[in-house]
C-alpha cells in the first residue's frame, strides 16, 4: 500500500504542475509542499528514489518507507493519515484523481469526434461534376465514359448559375 501512496502523490503532483512535467519537478514540488505545509523535510532525491522503487517493485510487493513520510504524503493527497488512505483505497475511492474509466471515456470521445470529423470532411470535399444539357449546365454524377469524351467539367457554382444558352434577340 505504501507504493500506492507514493504513486498517487506523484500523480497529484503531475496534475498540480501545469504543462509538461518531469519526475524531478514533481518530486521537488512535493518536497516543498511537505516542508511548507506539514513541516517534514524530505529531499526531492529521496522522493524520486521512492517513486522509482514503487514503479519497479513487483505488483504484490510493497516498498519500505519511513512512516512519517507516508503520513505526510497521505496528508498531501488529502487524507487525514495512512489509515484513512487505506480505507478509501479499499473502497475504490481515488480521492478526486481521474479514474481509469473516465480516462477511457475521454479517449473514446476524442476518437469518435475525430472519426466523425474525418467522415464529414471527406464527404464534403467530394468532387462534383457538371455537364452541358443543351441550354444550361446541370449537376451529374461522375461517369468515366463522359469524362473521357470531355463532356464532364468540375462543378463551378458560378458557371452553373450564370452560364446558359440565350436565344438571340435583336434588341440585345
Image: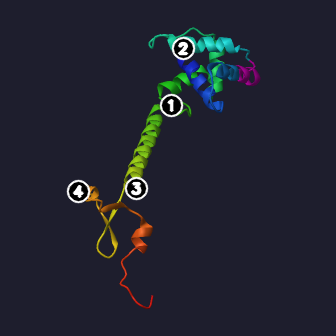
Residue holding disc 1: 93
Q: Kindly tell me whether residue 18 is visible in this rendering.
A: yes
Q: Secondary structure at mark 2?
A: helix
Residue 145 is marked as: 4
Q: Are marks 2 and 1 in contact (CB under 8 Å)?
A: no
Q: Is residue 35 magenta?
A: yes
Q: Are marks 4 and 3 in contact (CB under 8 Å)?
A: no
Residue holding disc 2: 54
Q: Residues within 10 Å of mark 1 (few under 14, many from 20)?
A: few
Of labels 2 and 3, earlier in sequence is: 2
Locate residue 10, reporting x and y percent.
Answer: 60, 23
Q: Nearer the viewer, mark 2 or mark 3?
A: 3
Q: What distance separates the C-alpha of mark 1 from that of mark 3? A: 46 Å
Residue range corresponding to the magenta coloring: 31-39
Locate residue 70, reporting x and y percent.
Answer: 62, 16
**Residue drawn at (65%, 25%) of the image:** 76
Residue 146 lies in quadrant: bottom left
Q: Secondary structure at mark 1?
A: loop
**Residue drawn at (42%, 67%) of the image:** 157
**Residue drawn at (37%, 55%) of the image:** 127
Residue 155 vs residue 46, the one in the foreground:
155
Q: Is residue 98 left or right of residue 137?
A: right
Residue 39 vs residue 24, the one in the foreground:
24
Residue holding disc 3: 124
Q: What distance separates the C-alpha of mark 2 from that of mark 1? A: 20 Å
Residue 171 vs residue 142, the one in the foreground:
171
Locate residue 93, reporting x and y percent.
Answer: 51, 31
Q: Kindly tell me whether residue 80 is visible in this rendering.
A: no
Of labels 4 and 3, earlier in sequence is: 3
Residue 129 lies in quadrant: bottom left
Amino acid at each position: 500500500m505504501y507504493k500506492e501512496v507514493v504513486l498517487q502523490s506523484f500523480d497529484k503532483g503531475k496534475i498540480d504542475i501545469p504543462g509538461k512535467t518531469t519526475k524531478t519537478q514533481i518530486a521537488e514540488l512535493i518536497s516543498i509542499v511537505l516542508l511548507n505545509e506539514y513541516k517534514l523535510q524530505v529531499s526531492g532525491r529521496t522522493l524520486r528514489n521512492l517513486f522509482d522503487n514503487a514503479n519497479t517493485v513487483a505488483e504484490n510487493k510493497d516498498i519500505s518507507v519511513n512512516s512519517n513520510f507516508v503520513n505526510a504524503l497521505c496528508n498531501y493527497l488529502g487524507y487525514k493519515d495512512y489509515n484513512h488512505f487505506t480505507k478509501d483505497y479499499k473502497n475504490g475511492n481515488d480521492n478526486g484523481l481521474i479514474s481509469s474509466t473516465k480516462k477511457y471515456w475521454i479517449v473514446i470521445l476524442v476518437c469518435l469526434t475525430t472519426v466523425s470529423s474525418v467522415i464529414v470532411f471527406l464527404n464534403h470535399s467530394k468532387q462534383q461534376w457538371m455537364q452541358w444539357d443543351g441550354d444550361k449546365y446541370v449537376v451529374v454524377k461522375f461517369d468515366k465514359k463522359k469524362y473521357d469524351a470531355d463532356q464532364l467539367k468540375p462543378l463551378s457554382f458560378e458557371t452553373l448559375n450564370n452560364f446558359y444558352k440565350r436565344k438571340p434577340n435583336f434588341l440585345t
